[in-house]
Amino acid sequence: MDTDQLRATLERTGLTQYEAEAYIATVELGSAPATEIADACGVPQARIYDVLRNLESEGYIETYQQGSLHARAHDPAAVVDDLQAYAETVTSAATEIRERWERPTVENHRVSVLKPLSSIFDRAREALEDAENELQATLTPAQFELFRPALSAAVDRGVVVKLTLTPEASGGADDIDIDSFDFAGVATEVRHRTLPTPFLVLADRTHVCFAPEAPLHPNHEYGVLVNDYSLSRIFDAHFQTAFWETWEPVYSARDGTLPATYTNIRECIDDIYDEFQAGRDVTLTVFGQSRTGREKRELTGRVVDVNYVASDGDAGPLLSSFVEAATLELDTGEEVVSVGGWGALVEDIEGQRFIVERIE
């Protein structure tokens, strides 16, 4: 590296041009009068004294009187450390710029198509880490292990995690030994779909990360990111009908005791319907938002009416249960409030979390 390059590098660490030139000259001379340093580096004689004092205050050199002002350089270890730290910062900045260039920009977009597939996995991890209420996911065993830390952290935060485990695109049901998986602390409920399934993560009813089953060629890989409350309902309906309700549970963190937490009004009603029809009092807490004003609401009361197409016993839910109204009437003691689920159109409250407190 020549002197000009060295000077330019020192300037990038915070020195002025004159300070960099004077410091290089002082290092080369070892110890010298200020006037000699000025002659060696080209700093004007009228400026050299101020420049040297600045270098001294910054710890690069020390000055002393020996008839006239002299200067000598300190051990350059500290300067070398600064340069190495600067080099590491530059390297990190270069890496970050490349990553940001390669990572698709999705802000202010409701729907984005992403390549490569690793991009959708990065976004999915962010969605898992940011979720506050509910996660729905279809994952292969490898993807489950990839996202296990984020899923575990979500459960620790109180997020309801619904997981459907599916075989690899090239495999089959026999490829998965369900008994070998430990789902405790990683999911609220797990179901096993025996058919290859697209990658899907749906977080808090808004953020969707989707990728089709593995294509024939890697160049055809892509993912879809949806950032929209209304559009994400399409993915929720697909998850509920194709990936969830029609497949048997293989794990549940629920043990049949109360309180019991739900994020889907239909699942909540399904579990309390028989008790309600038998005339028992069901006390429910609902967290949601006003349908009209969108302000947050928390209500606790007694269920006094249910409008719902109940499941047909062991045959599972009827198709009509997914498309017809699902409404609870809740008597809080002060008012009777109607509560619907995701996208409630006529009810007072759009419920997001339902806690069955007790049944008496």
Image (cartoon, helix red, strand yellow):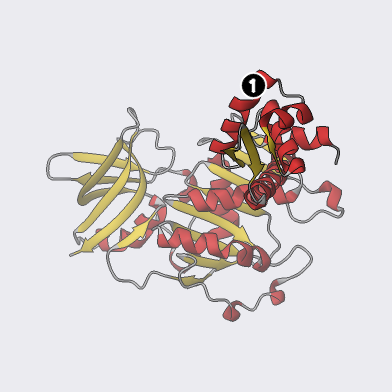
Q: Quadrant of the C terminus?
A: bottom left
Residue type indicated by callout 1: Arg
Q: Is residue 104 visible?
A: no
Identify the residue at image location x=65%, y=48%: 85
Identify the residue at image location x=83%, y=47%: 220
Residue furthest toward the bottom? Answer: 179
Residue furthest toward the left? Answer: 333
Foreground pick, 40 / 272: 40
Left or right relative to 209: residue 5: right
Residue 343 coordinates in the image, percent (x, y): 44, 38
Q: Quadrant of the N terminus?
A: top right
Using the image, determine if residue 175 lies above or below residue 129: below
Disc 1: CA contacts within 10 A as few (<14), some (14-19) or many (>=20): few
Choose top left, top right, bottom left or bottom right for residue 290: top left
Identify the residue at image location x=62%, y=50%: 78
Residue furthest toward the front? Answer: 67
Q: Residue under label 1, please give it.
A: 47
Helix, strand or loop at mark 1: helix
